[in-house]
Amino acid sequence: MTEIVDVIIPYSSEYTEKYKLERAKESAKNQTVDVNLIICEDDVGPAYGRNRGLERSKNRFVAFLDADDYWEEDKLEKQIKKLDETGSGLCLNKVRRGEEIIDPVRESEIEFIKDLLLCNISSLTSSILIDSEKFQNRFDEEMYRFEDHLFIIETVNQSGICFVNEILTTVEKHDNGLSSKTDQYKALNSRSKISKKIGDYYPSLKETAVRDLAQRHRWVGRDFYFNSDYKKSIELYKKSLSIKILPKTIAA
């Protein structure tokens, strides 16, 4: 293959040891296609780093690789082939995370979007390969969490999705990682934005998105209750009921 793939790696020494960055870089350099590494070192956040990488990107194909993670050597080659075969704008593959295998492969686009919405699949960012000729999306830098989910949803809505049914990405989670430090209260605002976009892009999933958002507010409210923060608990229960009246929320 003659294609050059831009590989964007956001990196912060606050969250990831240097040797893991080097491992990620080596897994990109060892690909069976030519790559151009774009390392974005900052402490602002991964969405910021990925967007700065997209601004510097000059090639048709762009992949994202978190500094904790690494690839099989034929990952990009197989994904480029699948993108060319299907005409889609985004390609994903199976992911290994510890002993767990994350399988995003679905028979339809709507089934994939639904499972992404419900968080039945996650940790997909380092498996993403995009065809930048199909769209010009960016990551939402104002989102506290799940900005990768929104990016995927918007991209799939514009350009379609395809899958390589193989484990080609390994994701490493650790106690110091950014995703391990989650403020549930703030994360709900991110889920609210995703819920709205789902309703706009996929009307058949609007009711599912609304119900899911109401349930998430109840779940977080329950956590605050058992941590004796009754004021926040009641606030979240009320918010849940304002989104959708569910019997379990009334009981809570």
Image: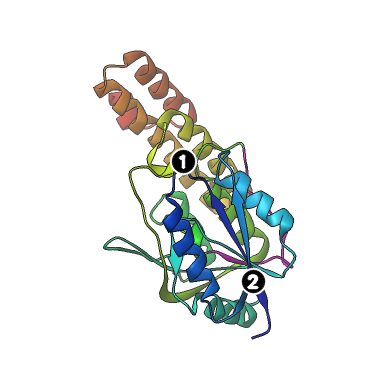
Comes first in the chain, label 1 or label 2: 2
**Image quarter for residue 246?**
top left
Q: Nearer the viewer, residue 219 or 244?
A: 219
Residue 140 lies in the magenta stretch: yes
Asked which secondary structure carries label 2, the reply is strand
- Crowdedness of circle 2 by 10 Å Cα count: few (<14), some, many (20+)? many
Residue 24 screen position, x and y as percent: 48, 63
For the point 61% across and 51% down, the residue is 40
Any mark on residue 5, and which? 2
Q: Amino acid at mark 2?
A: Val
Residue 160 screen position, x and y as percent: 62, 66
Residue 91 screen position, x and y as percent: 56, 69
Mark 1 highlights which residue? 14
Give the farthest residue toward the bottom: 1
Give the vertical position of 128 relative to 116 (above or below).
Answer: below
Give the vertical position of 249 relative to 197 (above or below).
Answer: above
Residue 28 screen position, x and y as percent: 53, 70
**Which quadrant is home to the N terminus?**
bottom right
- Crowdedness of circle 1 by 10 Å Cα count: few (<14), some, many (20+)? few
- State which region is magenta: 128-141
Main SS, magenta region, reads loop
- Image side of residue 210 versus residue 230, left or right: right
Asked which secondary structure carries label 1, the reply is loop
The figure's colour scheme reads rainbow
**Which quadrant is home to the C terminus?**
top left
Q: Nearer the viewer, residue 71 or 206?
A: 71
Q: Amino acid at mark 1?
A: Glu
